[in-house]
Amino acid sequence: MNPMPGRPRGVIVLGAAPEALCAVRELAALGYAVAWLPLEEAQAPAALPPNVAIYPAAELVGLGGYAGAFCAQVRRGEAIECLPGAAVLIALGNARCYPQERYGLPLGPRVLTPPQARQRLKDRTLEALLSHRKAHFLVMLDWGGETSRETAVEALHTARALRQNHAEVTLFYRDLKVDSAPLERLTRRMREEGVVFCRYIEVEVRFEEGGVHIAAPDGLVRGDMLILPEAVQPHPATLPLAALLKLRVGKDGYFQEVNVRQVRPGLTNRKGIYVAGRCHMDADREAALEDVSHVVASLDAFLHSLDEPPSGPTAEVERDRCIRCLTCVRTCPHAAAEVVEREGITAAYVEKAACWGCGICAAHCPVQAIALKGQAVPSWLAPTAQGVSIR
Amino acid sequence: MSMAQRLLVLACSRSAGEALAALEATGQTLPPDVTWVNLPCGGSVDVLHILRALEAGAEKVWVLACYEGACESLEGNRWAEKRVQWVQALLQEIGLGPERVVFRAISPTMAADLKAWLEEE
Amino acid sequence: MSDRPRAAVIGGGIAGIAASLNLAQRGIGVILIEREAQLGGNASTVCCKAVGGVCQHCGGCLFRDHLRALERAEGVSVFLQTHVERVERREGRLALLCERAQGEALSFEVPAVILATGFDHISPLAKGPYGYGLLPHVITGRDLEALLQGRGRTACNELPLGKVAFIQCVGSRDEHNGRGYCSQVCCRYALRLARVLQESRPEAEIAFFKMDLQTSGRDMAETWAAARGAFRIVAGMPALLERGAEGKVAFRYEEVLTGRQIRESFDLVVLATGIQPRADAALLAEQFGLNQDPSGFFATAPDGVSTLVPGVFAAGCCQAPRSIAESIAHAHQAAQACVLYLGGRA
């Protein structure tokens, strides 16, 4: 058997995050024809593999079809075009903000975010401070609430960069996150390089005499500048895209409900649609890109499995009994049911390739027109049109 | 009719069904007066299944499904619980004990708990 | 489907099963070799930690899901009670000379191998002064998992749950023990277990003794929000556990933030032991010609799954400590790398 047969299939990638570019490259390397819709203004990378088509200004207006045969409806100018794909991978990334309410401090000359501090290091506008022998930066994690993984790691890298530019750096933390090998290495190196780590529970921050004073457990620490990490939030396109694609969103606004059975790489409530990276997890950039590799591996195996007929029960509609009430369409968590015209009958239809065989539609159908094929309940238990009489 | 009289279990095969399989793998069997019906998901428990079980003479009906946040179809377990509540209200209304129908959440790793529940009943 | 197996997976824990399933989905024949009499490894010993009818996302149930999928999968041949005795290279293929129970010899020749040999729990004896095995009511998180899985939630009623101390990082983040690394899973399982204990005995006073609690991730958000309010969390680690009055366990610790020395006694102490490379990791590394990282896990290329030996890949906790969900994800990636390797050879 050739492990990589013809691969006629394509994959649709949605999003402009670094994860999307990573996914596009990995999928292209596997031989897939990739249709990439960044869905927002983004700088197109200089070189893309030949089997990648990028649609920079395209607007996604719908997604038809099902796993193995999706069709992304895309508006380009006046025309609506249909881009085929066997699977969809979403990598929107997340959005950033400065959580002023959490910190109770506006940004200003003495309060910077890590990206601002790094920009100034790059522009050399921090130099005045740094040439001063005791330029001292105070980096504060988990103040007023837990700092997200991504921005905490960014703050750590910034603290390290400042230290490498010969500043004094004190990093305030509550629980240092070291639960990944790269983070452990990073924090260890930072200590070796002379970043001071200071644990706190409560701190008081005051601005006095042209400096920042932090009353911490170890005593009063005086610095020149306070570095406060940004917060992350769901990408603004998450909800509209989820609605368009009939995908679930968690209470926290990110893709996927937090569900233990959906942690398997990047699954969503719909077969053939995957999410990767920071649009569904709290991850630093490195972990987000790792997630892309996991998801691509799972997606690739899934597309191969489409060659085999699906196993397990699937819902089947007795179409001439259907009353077109749309109950199944509303209740199917996997967006597998629709009302369509087929063979002259307009009635409910459950697409086998999209069905998970849960039977939610069958239990809901008010006229018992749906049954799970391949999963029989004992005949004495099966609902009948006659109803029941309890003694 | 081919059903034991005491207890009918309508089980989500992904949680309760697996717990039973784990129990049976240790050589234990269901009590003879318990009838077990595996369904693919809690969401496929129909109100009519429960009512027909009562009609067929089951003293009690258990509906076992996944915990909140563990249903592969996201909300099959919620539907199962809602349907049990619906039947309970109905039984109340017609003067039968609502306690004859019970919803319980379970996970595949809870074979020991399942055994304890069955012994308690 | 080819008659000839294309890959062997060594280790039938959650990572090995997930890797096998990924390969099987592509129609690649798999030989799954497991040393024990049952599949599952460490993941099969994880108990359900749902609290208040809500899942805490520990992933314990995923093993059974995977086992069921494996039963349905085509093209996976499982060999239980089988272990690799010797590995030979034959014209670019790997010959695995195995031994089964009762000394029966068995050999496979495959172009690629995924190692998914898992981990050993760090022995609580690694922290001698914690008195495991000597003091009553000092147990490990693993003991508690086994108790809950083996006897059900009612087992909580027999535990002395007046004052409970969870002691984190037992053997992890401990350079003196040669384990400078974080085991990644212990804070999570301990916090979840503590909530399970508290559910059955709401009056229990639970304290956590920790260096840094690792609580990031969406799947921990609910647990952490509930735990923060419910448990006393102490930055400080006890040095020595001893017999206290009335059969209790007593210890002294320094509260890091205040520098205060405090002596306290508890009815039950749960040691959060972590993950270490399996005792036979060095042997396997030698058989396959792999490198081990300074902590003893299999060393890989920057992709995290390819070892430096062509055709040999690592999945799950044999490469680094991981949760069940992370092991599954990593196994998928290892399978993908394996497929690319097989494809490149065709």
Image (cartoon, coloured by chain):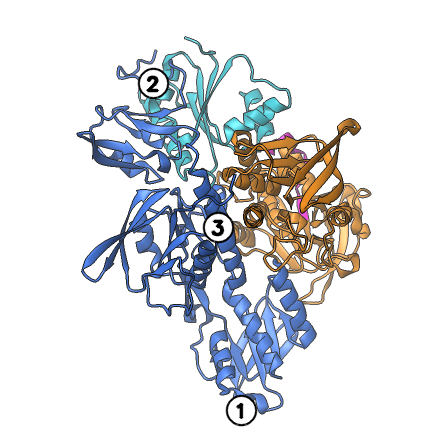
SS label for mark 2:
loop
Query: Which segment is the magenta one?
Result: C150-165
Q: What's under tag 2, amino acid-wise? A: Gly
Q: CA distance from mark 1 to mark 3?
A: 46 Å
Q: Position of residue A167 (x, y in %)?
A: 61, 83
Please state the chain letter of the residue tagged with numbered disc 3 in the rendered image: A
Chain identifier, colour orange: C
What residue is pinned by disc 2? B95
Which marked residue is nearer to the observer: mark 2 or mark 3? Answer: 3
Q: Does residue C160 show up magenta in the picture? A: yes
Front residue of this view, candidates A292 and A287: A292
Front residue of this view, candidates A304 and C121: A304
Q: What's under tag 1, amino acid-wise? A: Ala
Q: CA distance from mark 2 to mark 3?
A: 54 Å
SS label for mark 3:
helix
Q: Is the residue under label 3 in contact with that under label 2 (CB below 8 Å)?
A: no
**Disc count in the image?**
3
Q: Report whether B2 appears left or right of A327.
A: right
What residue is pinned by disc 3? A295
SS label for mark 1:
helix
Which marked residue is nearer to the observer: mark 1 or mark 3? Answer: 3
- Drawn colour of chain B? cyan
Q: Residues within 10 Å of mark 2 (few under 14, many from 20)?
A: few
Residue A128 tag number: 1
Q: Position of residue A99 (x, y in %)?
A: 43, 69
Q: Position of residue C289 (x, y in %)?
A: 74, 51
Q: Is residue C152 above or below residue B59?
A: below
Q: CA distance from mark 1 to mark 2?
A: 84 Å
Q: Report whether C183 appears left or right of A356.
A: right
Chain identifier, colour blue: A
